[in-house]
Image (tube, rainbow, N blue to C red):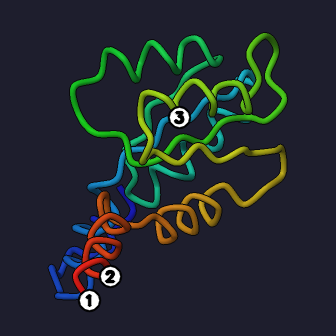
């Protein structure tokens, strides 16, 4: 992994990078094999754990059979069969806190993943804010 090679000295900054990014798991659904492989490689180089699916049904199977947590789903918007938008609707009912972000060829996938993860609020944060308002 690039982060580990670049951080051989074990400095504080390297440890922080490893601990914040490495814990994130991304489900990547893309029916174009070359795009999927390239995106998965770029995300892994940044320290993400990537689960790659060749289509929306495979993505649904991976999410249902996985015991660990998913932090983000990146799905090609125009997949054959079930589209990325349909996949997002499927996930919305089962995983309301899971963001499903549409992707297209030629996009900065790593940047899009980092932006989506940074925008995510901790689960229950909205409920806590509302309950505080009621007490006031």
Which image quarter: residue 10?
bottom left
Q: Residue 92 carries which label?
A: 3
Q: In this view, does 37 lie above or below 97?
A: above
Q: Where is residue 17 in the image (x, y as percent from the top left)?
A: 30, 75
Quadrant of the image containing the C terminus = bottom left
Work out which quarter of the rendered image holds the N terminus and state it.
bottom left
Reading the chain from its start, which is encountered first: label 1 or label 3?
3
Q: Tag 2, which secondary structure?
A: helix
**42 left or right of 3?**
right
Q: Disc 3 and disc 2: Cα gap in Å? A: 27 Å
Q: Which mark is residue 133?
A: 2
Label 1 residue SS: loop
Name the residue nearer the viewer: 82 or 44.
82
The quadrant in which residue 41 appears is: top right
CA–CA distance between discs 1 and 3? 32 Å
Left or right: where does residue 6 sit relative to residue 88? Answer: left
Dot 3: within a 10 Å radius of its alpha carbon, few (fewer than 14), some, or many (20 or more) residues?
A: some
Q: What element carries label 3?
A: helix
Residue 34 located left or right of residue 18: right
Image-based side of 39 in relation to 71, left or right: right
The residue located at (56%, 62%) in the rendering is 116
Residue underneath mark 1: 136
Q: How far apart are marks 2 and 1 (CA)?
A: 5 Å
The answer to which of 104 and 100 lies nearer the viewer is 100
């Amino acid at each position: 992994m690039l982060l580990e090679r670049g951080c051989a000295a074990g400095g504080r900054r390297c440890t922080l990078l490893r601990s914040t990014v490495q814990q994130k798991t991304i489900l990547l659904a893309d029916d174009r094999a070359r795009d999927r492989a390239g995106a998965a490689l770029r995300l892994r180089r940044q320290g993400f754990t990537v689960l790659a699916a060749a289509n929306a049904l495979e993505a649904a199977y991976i999410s249902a059979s996985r015991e660990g947590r998913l932090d983000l789903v990146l799905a090609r918007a125009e997949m054959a069969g079930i589209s990325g938008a349909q996949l997002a609707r499927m996930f919305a009912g089962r995983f309301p806190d899971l963001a499903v972000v549409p992707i297209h060829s030629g996009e900065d996938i790593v940047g899009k993943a980092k932006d989506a993860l940074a925008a995510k609020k901790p689960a229950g944060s909205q409920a806590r804010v509302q309950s505080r308002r009621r007490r006031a």
